[in-house]
Image (cartoon, rainbow, N blue to C red):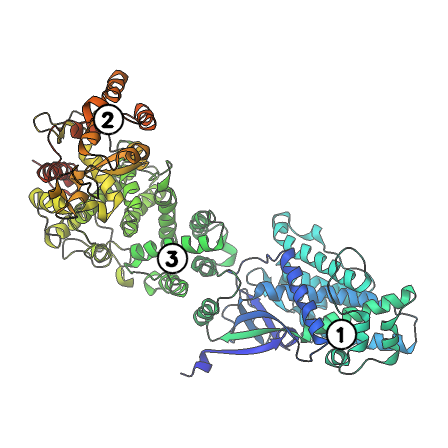
Amino acid sequence: MEISEIFSAAPKSSFQLLGDPGVGFYVPAYQREYSWDQRNIYRLFEEVALGLNHLLESEDAITFIGTVISIHDNKYQTVHPLVREDVPSRVMLIIDGQQRITTLLIAVTALHEQIALAKVRLEGDSSVLAVWLKEKATETLRKLQSVYEQDMAYGDGALQWYPRLIRAYEDTWSRKKEKAKYASPIARHLFHYGSHARSDNSSRYSHDVASIPESAQAKFKALFNNFGEIRKILRGVAFEKGSVRLELPSFADLAGSETLQETLFNSVLPDSVVVLLKGAEGKKEREYQGLIVLMVLARFLLDRVAVTVVTAKNEDYAFDMFEALNTTGEPLTAFETFKPRVVQAEGLADYETSASRKSMLVVEQYLSGFEKAQDRQDATSNLLVPFALAETGEKLSRRLSVQRRYVKDTFDLPIQSKIDEKRLYIRHLAHVALFLDKAWLKGKGNQCVVPDVPKDDDALVHLCVRALRAASHDITVAPMARYFSTVQLVKERQPSDPDAYKCQAKELVTAIKALTAFFVFWRGSRTGTERIDDYYRDLLQKGRGNSLRPLARHPGRKSGGELPSAADFRDGLRDILNKEGCIKGKEEWVKKACRTPVYKVSSALTRFMLLVATHQTIPDEATPGLVIPARKGMLDLLTVDAWNDFEQMSIEHVAPQVRRDGDWDSALYDDPDTVEQVGNLALIPLKENASISNRSWDEKRHIYKILSATTEKQIEWLIGAAGEEIGSAFKARTAEILAKSKYLPHLASIADVNESWSVNLLNRRSECLAGLVWDRLAPWLGIEVH
């Protein structure tokens, strides 16, 4: 295939683009509403003014306003609704450039109106000057008219003339009264202005706001405002009315530039016109001058305002072009380009009350929370990547064109050709969006909530999700969303069966806990990821041997069965941990975890492991430095509140990362990873950590005693005894920080150590903490703990 068959690019003037006979421009439903504001309008006219001034010196002067990307829809596949016998002979689908094209058309109608009104003032004047002005005005008006509408030769009254630009679903080209519809702002404006201009050129055009439904009036605001602003600009430059001015060529410049005259009027101006431009005494002459300025502007806008028109073979190529050209418009998200397919599947008449629309609103509500264009693009990508994993088990690129193609292709798979199947696809997308919105993205604050989790599990489940989110373990969203989706489906399908709902909610809990335990055991026992993401993807697309079906809804884009039970999923994760991870039990885990520099692996993982290890523990009196399990209710750390509290804390290295000579056992630094192991780490508030990070072991131990002291009297005594205990009193600022510090009971076990902080003690503490982590989390993977 030749590249020229895929796309072509050609420079065109506004008139060549918009006035092309037989061409109708079509804005697909996924394109945003017209939104240019006053700044865009003035920038456009300032660029036109610069081009006009340059034309005084150079006949090559143009104003280039960017690129228009389109598709020649020769089979009318994108036109909805379609009146096949009435559609224009060539339909150009606008992929990029609708804001500029719409603005040009608004400007053309405003120029047509002002020139038509100025021409009326020539009535009764038969002078040579007036005759020339009438002829050129008529010529200019016809040219402008051919840009904003096209004559279809016949039709029911005004329906003989088609607006050049219409929008999908809102508008319909037709010559017949019962089928034609022009309801979008631009199509309505072009149609009604055209009707007004043909019937009466002696009065100003006014928008019939009363006939627009109140619910739709907001989207007309930008067009109405910009039409009014362009009117002000034209009246200001032509008749010096109002405060709006442009730096256009002076009348004397127009009279003296044969280059400009020949370029815009195909000949030099008659002497009578030159005389008029050089000096005008009366009101009538000044109005004639204004008409000339309007015609100069109109002709330059039509013939010298240029665009590059890129015509692509299909939408995929067109969107690729859009991204590659890096145009100034905001790229449409993959979700926005997907929406028309959903509308088409449901049918335009039925969409508003359809199940698909309810699901689409969930997604729209989620994405609308991202106001900036780039944030919205990122949010859409962050939605579609886990959705693709959950839907078909595929690793989806973050490239926009790939994501657009994915949702289009998977929505139209033969296995979901029926509307009920397509609705499930959209519902699944909505469930992933809901999970991201409520549970995942709000994980940074206190509002993290996994909807529909049983109350007795919610604190623990929310903590697990927070930890996975903080560790940027985004790959887990897909499997969690699969089980979350089944909960939502049960709620929707069996709202009167609370037992079915509770059973499925427990499945979600089991799945999340299993994922969290697997993540901790895998990442906490090795320095690299070692294909952890690939194992998740395999479970989603392939399952695990004969014991676990794929988790994805349509794995490999083929029909899938029911979602495996959470117990089967848990067992699949455990099997991966055993066989590929070489962790069959506590002994292997502790051995690996003790040697892992977990602080280097992930701070979030480290924080979670420390919370799990010290949850409901007390200092081991028999072995200072270690902890042992305590009764329930003591030191409850496996809660969201505890995570929020400790998330504000830093991870303290008992033995500093960089050794101070004489203060610490040199053996601690023989292997640089030793001080990064879990046994050398603790959670301490930022201020306190900044005060103690580079101190000696004796000083740190004394501070740990203060931070874990149970009474104000103890704190006061320990601060006062610093000079005697560690050889020097605390500085005033340090003493103040320690006196106001929080109670940190998890430091008591370290404070009890009376020997030096050695490699042996550090290793024993690592073994202790790693063992407690195993004992707490192994049951989440279905492993019995003795």
Q: Nearer the viewer, mark 3 or mark 2?
A: 2
- Residue under the image location 18 percent in, 52 percent down: 527
- Check contact, mark 3 vs mark 1: CB within 8 A: no
Quarter residue 138 falls in: bottom right
Query: Which of these two is toward me, 667 or 781?
Result: 667
Image spot of residue 170 (x, y percent): 58, 59
- In the rendering, which numbered label is found on residue 178? none
Quarter residue 781 falls in: top left
**Badge 3 density bin: few <14, some 14–19, many ≥20, Cα 10 Å:** many
Q: Which residue is mark 3?
A: 422
**Badge 2 density bin: few <14, some 14–19, many ≥20, Cα 10 Å:** few
Image spot of residue 378 (x, y percent): 41, 55
Q: Is residue 687 above or below residue 470?
A: above
Q: Amino acid at mark 2?
A: Ser
Q: Amino acid at mark 1?
A: Thr
Q: Which residue is mark 2?
A: 728
Of mark 3 and mark 2, the one earlier in the sequence is 3
Q: Quadrant of the C terminus?
A: top left
Q: Nearer the viewer, mark 1 or mark 2?
A: 2
Q: Which residue is mark 1?
A: 140
Alpha carbons under labels 3 and 2: distance apart: 74 Å
